[in-house]
């Protein structure tokens, strides 16, 4: 293949900081196990259109997915997904759910097994 053919046949890759507008922190504190679900509602603020990755995130989250799962599906770094998901939560386009820790301060064993199963399936 020539250089021209390789350049035109490969998918366009965008640097992560361009997806988040240069931001590295989410407006909402999100852990990798935080479940995100799209609300199907209209955004509270419509001053900025959603980037392609945020639209895809909303489609993926018609059923709840964790930040880690979204990151794997979108092939984006965790921090980028946290920023995008945080924006969607603040705009009312998505909701969050965090599994509660047991009374002894440790996470639920079933949650840890689901996370392990998800990581092994990657």
Image (cartoon, rainbow, N blue to C red):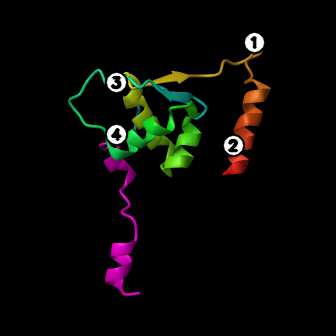
- Residue 36, x across and y down, in percent: 52, 29
Which label was assigned to residue 23? 4
Residue in the picture at 77% in, 35% down:
113
Residue in the picture at 74% in, 41% down:
116
Residue in the picture at 59% in, 22% down:
98
- Residue 40, x across and y down, in percent: 41, 26
Which label was assigned to residue 118? 2
Looking at marks 4 and 3 on the same chain, the residue that comes earlier in the sequence is marked by 4
**SS at circle 4:** loop
User: From the viewer's perspective, is residue 90 above or below residue 61?
Assistant: above
Residue on which disc 3 sits: 91
How many residues crowd mark 4 within 10 Å: few (<14), some (14–19), many (20+)?
A: some
Looking at marks 4 and 2 on the same chain, the residue that comes earlier in the sequence is marked by 4
Q: CA distance from mark 4 to mark 2?
A: 28 Å
How many residues crowd mark 1 within 10 Å: few (<14), some (14–19), many (20+)?
A: few
Q: Could you say which is closer to the camera, residue 115 or residue 38?
A: 38
- Residue 10, x across and y down, in percent: 40, 70
Which label was assigned to residue 103? 1
Which label was assigned to residue 77? none
Q: Is residue 30 visible from the viewing direction of this image?
A: no
- Residue interval drawn in magenta: 1-23
């Amino acid at each position: 293949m020539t250089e021209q053919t390789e350049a035109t046949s490969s998918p366009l890759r965008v640097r992560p900081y361009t997806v988040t507008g240069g931001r590295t922190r989410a407006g909402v504190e999100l852990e990798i196990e935080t479940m995100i679900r799209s609300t199907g509602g209209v955004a509270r603020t419509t001053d900025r259109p959603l980037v392609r990755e945020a639209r895809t995130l909303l489609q993926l989250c018609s059923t709840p997915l964790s930040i880690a799962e979204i990151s794997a599906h979108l092939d984006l770094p965790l921090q980028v997904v946290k920023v995008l998901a945080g924006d969607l939560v603040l705009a009312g386009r998505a909701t969050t759910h965090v599994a509660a820790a047991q009374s002894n301060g440790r996470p639920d064993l079933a949650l840890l097994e689901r996370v392990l199963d998800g990581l092994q399936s990657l």
